[in-house]
Image (spheres, rainbow, N blue to C red):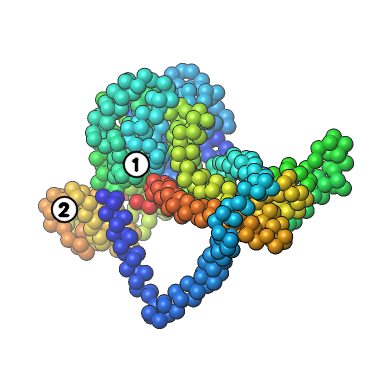
Amino acid sequence: MAGTTQKRWTSGQTKSRRGTEDPWYIRWTLVAIAALFAGVFLVLPLANVFGQALAKGWQAAFGSLTDPDTIAATKLTALATLISVPLNTFFGVAAAWLIAKFEFRGKAILTTLIDLPFSVSPVVTGLVYVLLFGLRGYFGPWLDRHDIQIIFAVPGIVLATIFVTFPFVARELIPLMQAQGSDQEQAALTLGATGWQTFWHVTLPSIKWGLLYGVILCTARAVGEFGAVSVVSGHITGITDTLPLRIEKLDKEYNSVAAFSIAGLLAVLALLTLGLKTWLEHRQQRELDLAQTSSDSPDEH
Amino acid sequence: MSIELRNISKRFGDVAAVQNVSFKVAEGELVALLGPSGGGKTTVLRMIAGLEQPTEGDILIRGQRVNDVSVQKRNIGFVFQGYALFKTMSVADNIAFGLKIKKWPKAEIDDRVAELLKLFGLDGLGKRFPHQLSGGQRQRVAIARSLAPKPSVLLLDEPFGAVDAKIRQELRDWLVHLHDELSVTTVFVTHDQEEAMEVSNRIVIFSRGNLEQIGAPRQVYEQPSNEFVARFIGVLNVLELRVENGVARLNELTFPSHGVAEGSSLRIGFRPYAVQISPQLSEYRYRATLRHVYFLGVQLRLELETPSGLTLRTRITKDEFVRLGLTEDQEISFQIREYRVLSRDGFTLNPEVSAVHQAPSIGEGI
């Protein structure tokens, strides 16, 4: 019965959309503008990346990827990603849970703080870390005395990556969890489940697609981050160069095949992410729809 | 199992949601918590469940104080207003959830789930997901899930709120039968007085966090303890009278003064069934026009308008309506058979209200 109502509603919506249709020439002009824009600004550069990388053949391209310094950069990027993504996943789930399911003072401030990395320029982020942990920073002398190096070393790169990718998972989960409310969790409690059992069996399954989506976006950003990492890295070849930094360096050395080969690698990763993201968006939309259909307020009937 | 609330109060910040409420629910009883929205009834239910903590007072289940017992350990079944089914689980998994948590052996879980599916008329739906069910089915799954671990108390928050009128009626009957069969102590919240009257053994009436009255459906209807209850349970005609020359009067309607001083006010109320009407204009004391007739099925609701413009509500069976040969806008005569004094001189009476005063019929004079 619910199915038919849903269908009727959908067909009604399609009709009304047709009712506000514009004349054909307007539509085609808009389509042409959009296609031209996408072609010039998105497809052309992407094609150029692969074109440049393969300018001297497949072997040259692959050869440049197996260069020891490039491999070191790949490892560093992987390390920073593998540390920052799980941490931010954990933090994101915890923060979203807190914001969506509880009322407390300072909730608005916390929500704003989560967005901070989105609004601050990555370069500023990098500089903040330099000011805190650099030799002449607040904690610099103390760190130096204890022989701990953060800036111009791997810890700084990891820290900067964590900061920049901080909001992705939380941002994705907050609206989803808010839409789902806490009724299901309370039901689990009345059935004897502990907090952890409730989270594992009830909360997590109902947010899994949204969570995966957030993790994918977080990973993409962690792999591709340039600005903040560039400031704290120090650009020591083979030690503190991440893949994006390596690309810049190779480009400055006029080694365009190597630079574009790595760029191509990142582009492939990006395309994969995009594909996954589209698929997940679809799954997540269903999750959200489900959350809304079964939290129907009885007062509406 | 029996439930007892002793002097329970609950405050959310500065808002007092429940104020000094005490009542008992006997073992095996089916009790309705009734009241308008924001009356505190859901808060009371959630405190019994352990989902909220009372600010003051004690909650006892089978004589044991359970204030410090967590919701998980109270062994209650709770049915939420929107059902709160686990959307990512099938119907069978929903019902089995509490049993898995309590580590029942697999074979016993399967048996119990099959038994409940059958008992609740959900045979063959075990593999479906909540979004593939109708409202009535979801509601039954929610109740089955809450009953699966054999709770000692079943608590339902507006259980029939989210389904349409026809299914609601079926579900009410079904809940009564289920309760007869399982005889588990059951408390449910509703804002629908008809539902409370029909389903429960006893009704607890709340208004703005206070317990107004507790009693059997018939008792609260016939002997409301105050004006709020009288108006909330069923329809009540209320008249504000003024005492002049020893007679309480509102326009052409006159009543005895009931000892109220000259020039003071007197408020009375009467049920629709207390108003008797006749097409013979000479039969009863007062005249009125039959302004509106609402068909409710077996019963009709009538709205009378007196010559001075007062509106009174009355009820009559369909057969009676036909027998009297009534039509809309017809002139009729009427009398008020009995009424209650609600307040004198602006002072609200409580227990006295239940004293019924027979209205003098024609010829007696005042």
Q: Which residue is mark 2?
A: B321
The one nearer the camera, A26 or B298, is: A26
Q: Which residue is mark 1?
A: B130
Q: Count of labels shown?
A: 2
Residue A244 place in picture, x, y as percent = 66, 54
In primary-sequence order, the first of circles 1 and 2 is 1
Q: Residue at x 57, y 29 (%)?
A: B56
Q: In the displayed structure, would residue A47 be above or below residue A231?
A: below
Decide if residue A138 is on the left or right side of residue B124: right
Residue A50 place in picture, x, y as percent = 55, 61
**Res. B130 in view:** yes
The one nearer the camera, B190 or A91, is: A91
Q: Amino acid at mark 1?
A: Pro
Q: In the displayed structure, would residue B30 be above or below residue B158?
A: above
Q: Residue at x 44, y 74 (%)?
A: A31
Q: Are marks 1 and 2 on the same chain?
A: yes
To which chain does the residue with label 2 belong? B
Q: Quadrant of the N terminus of chain B?
A: top left
Q: Which mark is residue B218?
A: none
Q: In the displayed structure, would residue B99 be above or below residue A261?
A: above
Decide if residue A215 is on the left or right side of residue B77: right
Decide if residue B240 is on the left or right side of residue A94: left
Q: Nearer the viewer, mark 1 or mark 2?
A: 1
Q: In the displayed structure, would residue B332 be above or below residue A38?
A: above
